[in-house]
Amino acid sequence: MNYQKGLFEKLKEAGFTQKQIGAALGMEQATVSQFKNCKAPLPDKHAVNIAKLLGMRESEVLASIHAQWAKEPEVKSAWLKLVTGTAATIILIPATMIHDCAQCILC
């Protein structure tokens, strides 16, 4: 089973009907069926809303759907790295905050 279809299965397991999903996402039941059956990629705004309904991390849902639909192996790999957490993370902290952070850690 692919990721997008799995999201709709999780919604079903959580007790949502296609009609309720459509109402929550602002789309017709027939459109829900098209996305459920993977006729097209789920738009980002709907993926975020489904993540919220299921209590999942929005970034994981978005990256997983993009990975599923990526055609190039390098692009698919890049999206999957975001899902698995192997992508490098850069945190920018203003220099003025470094002193305060060091004090908080030591306190």
Image (cartoon, rainbow, N blue to C red):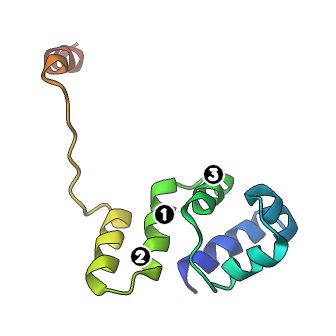
Residue type marked 2: Ala
Residue type marked 3: Lys
Spatial CA span between label 2 and label 1 = 9 Å
Q: Earlier in the sequence, mark 1 or mark 3?
A: 3
Q: Which residue is mark 2?
A: 67
Residue type marked 1: Leu
Mark 2 neighbour density, 10 Å: few (under 14) some (14–19) many (20 or more): many
> At which x and y percent is residue 93?
20, 30
Looking at the image, residue 20 sits to the left or right of residue 74; the answer is: right
Q: Please, is residue 39 above or below residue 106 in the view?
A: below
Residue appearing at x 46%, y 81% in the figure: 69
Q: Earlier in the sequence, mark 2 or mark 1?
A: 1
> At which x and y percent is residue 48?
58, 56
Q: Which residue is mark 1?
A: 62
Mark 3 neighbour density, 10 Å: few (under 14) some (14–19) many (20 or more): few
> At which x and y percent is residue 100?
20, 14
Q: Which residue is mark 3?
A: 52
Residue appearing at x 63%, y 79% in the figure: 5
Given residues 45 and 52, the one toward you in this image is 45
Residue appearing at x 26%, y 81% in the figure: 74
> At which x and y percent is residue 91?
22, 40
